[in-house]
Image (tube, grey):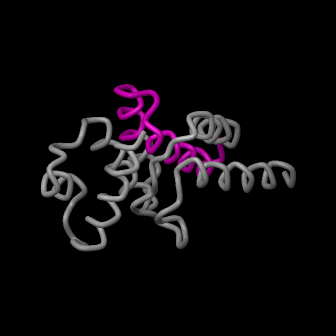
Amino acid sequence: MVQIKWLACVFVIAFTLTGCASLEEDLNRYGYGPMSEDMKLSDQGFDALSQGNYQEAEKYLQEALSLNPLNPYALLNMGVVYQNTGRLEKARLMYIKVMAQNPDAMAVRSNLDGYVGKSLGEIAGENYEALQRKMKVQ
């Protein structure tokens, strides 16, 4: 648990200091070695999601989840893909899976203001609440 918090702090510092380097380069620079394959795929999925390419994002995130079904980054971002493509019930389930894990991992990058530095559980909770409101309106 402490190691995850330490790693999250290193991520935040690394992104603040480097700006243009990839996440994997930052991990190597600070002695954490290469990223796991599921995290690489999750990172690629996030990049595609940030560009609005939901089909490509879904492909990467599905692959990440096939390698690690508990990857909270992939679960959270898959929820966003599902929500933005109208599959609201699937989105809701992704957010619930993240909240159930109650991960300490923090967002080191975000395509929305105010999310960097928040825990993935917090973000999933906020997305879940927004989704619940949207589902009631429909």
* In the displayed structure image, the side of residue 102 where residue 64 appears, left or right: left
Q: Position of residue 7 (x, y in %)?
A: 32, 50
Residue drawn at the location 34% of the way across and 51% of the way down: 6
**Residue at left 62%, top 34%?**
100
Chief secondary structure of the magenta span?
Answer: helix
Does the segment drawn in magenta span residue 74? yes
Residue sitting nearer the eye, 99 or 112: 99
x and y percent of residue 97 in the render?
Answer: 59, 34
The number of discs equals 0
Residue 134 lies within the magenta run: no
Residue 132, horizontal then vertical, whole percent: 78, 49
**Against 58, is 63 above or below?**
above
Snapshot quadrant of residue 48: bottom left
Q: Residue at horizontal 45%, vertical 27%?
A: 69
**Residue segment shown in magenta:** 59-87
Residue in the image at 52% along x and 68% along y: 112
